[in-house]
Image (cartoon, rainbow, N blue to C red):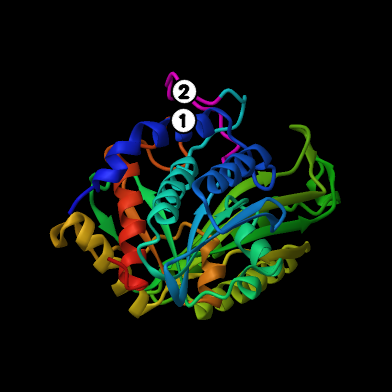
Amino acid sequence: MAVENWVSREIAELTAFRRDLHENPELLYETHRTAAKVAGALRAAGCNEVIEGIGRTGVVGVIRGRAAGRTIGLRADMDALPIQEATGLPFASKVPGKMHACGHDGHTTMLLGAARHLAETRAFDGTVIVIFQPAEEGGAGALAMIEDGLFDRWPCDEVYGMHNMPNLPLGQFTTCKGPNMGAVDMLDITITGKGGHAAQPHHSVDPMPALAGIVQAIHGMSARSIDPFDSHVVSLCVVEGGDAFNVIPQQITVKGTVRTLSETVRDHVEARVRTIVENIAAGNACIGQVSYERSYPVLVNHDLETEFAAEAARTVAGAENVSLSMTPTLGGEDFAFMLQKVPGCMINVGNGSSANLHHPEYAFNDAVIGWGCSYWVQLVRDRLNGN
């Protein structure tokens, strides 16, 4: 079927909407302008209800079909990243240090385009809940919306998300059943010794040897205490300590991230990191402390709903352009919180050749808009018995 005619007719207007969002990026929960534009567009489209301020700055639109029936949720994220854009595009970000470097402007536009068509045609039985979420980039906006009553006020039988994927060819879709994206944990290690003059280390307790041992042991842990088939990453990314070339520091801090695809491995990694830090620090006459914060859970696609999502994508793009063999990624995604509450699936749509997500030169491909809109509409038709 490919891109539908109605999308082709509206593509110029949708592209202009997307580029306006791109020029005016907003971070985390500060998506006030974006949310207002989305809410205004949903009202203009004729949604039955448009509710703002869910999860601080989230927007929910309710579209009722021609008859009673089941309810499905469709979700898009709205926030940008604290990155200085380097694309050189004529519609590049006007806000220094902020950029839509993950394509959330495109995600918002694709769902909005689908919502407009669904509200106009009502060619389905049941209810569609379109969910526009803030703060995906580290702020857990999905959880905030849930805690603010998202699924209590609008109970959904299924919920679906979609993300663009750089370097997946345009017009292709990919996903997989089960664990699809990693849990995101944050690690903060403190090693405390006794500072002093670098020329008299015997009067100090140098935390540097403890640091060296801890770094080696954590990396060795990944290679030797976890099944190689259990995907995980421990990356130590920040080291802070010391102020002068001739002073042994009193304290060193190390910060990093842990990514896993199962709760069992997640528990094991946390326990092992604590043991390594405390024991190696003690062996070097230091004190080792770990602050371990669990953020987003593993994103787990439900088997049946993943088949539903793939079937809708096949109708739009052709069976040869849809894969259920995606290799899971250890990148995080807070849509995982929604999938813990309601069965559903996250699918990826090809963005064509581009820089990777979260890169200053990343560019959302406006040609994706038609594919994404068509997918959303087809999914609603399939799941709500439309024509």
Question: Few, some or many C-alpha atoms within 10 Å of disc 1 (few <14, some 14-19, many ≥20)?
Answer: many
Nearer to me, 275 or 155 = 155
Q: Which residue is mark 2?
A: 91
The image shows residue 3 at horizontal and vertical percentages of: 24, 47
* Residue 129 painted magenta: no
Query: What is the number of the mark on residue 19?
Result: 1
Q: Is residue 384 left or right of residue 146?
A: left
Q: Residue at x 57, y 69 (%)?
A: 337
Alpha carbon distance from label 1 to label 2: 6 Å
Question: Few, some or many C-alpha atoms within 10 Å of disc 2 (few <14, some 14-19, many ≥20)?
Answer: some
The image shows residue 82 at horizontal and vertical percentages of: 60, 36
Q: Quadrant of the C terminus?
A: bottom left
Residue extending farthest to the left is 320
State the extent of the magenta-drawn residues as a range: 80-93
Q: Quadrant of residue 175?
A: bottom left
* Residue 82 painted magenta: yes
Q: Is residue 293 left or right of residue 243?
A: left
Q: Residue at x 44, y 30 (%)?
A: 16
The image shows residue 40 at horizontal and vertical percentages of: 59, 42
The image shows residue 286 at horizontal and vertical percentages of: 78, 61
Check whether the beta carbons of the residues at disc 1 and disc 2 lie within 8 A of each other. yes
Q: Is residue 296 visible?
A: yes
Nearer to me, 308 or 187 = 308
Nearer to me, 247 or 41 = 41
Amino acid at dot 2: Phe
Q: Residue at x 48, y 38 (%)?
A: 101
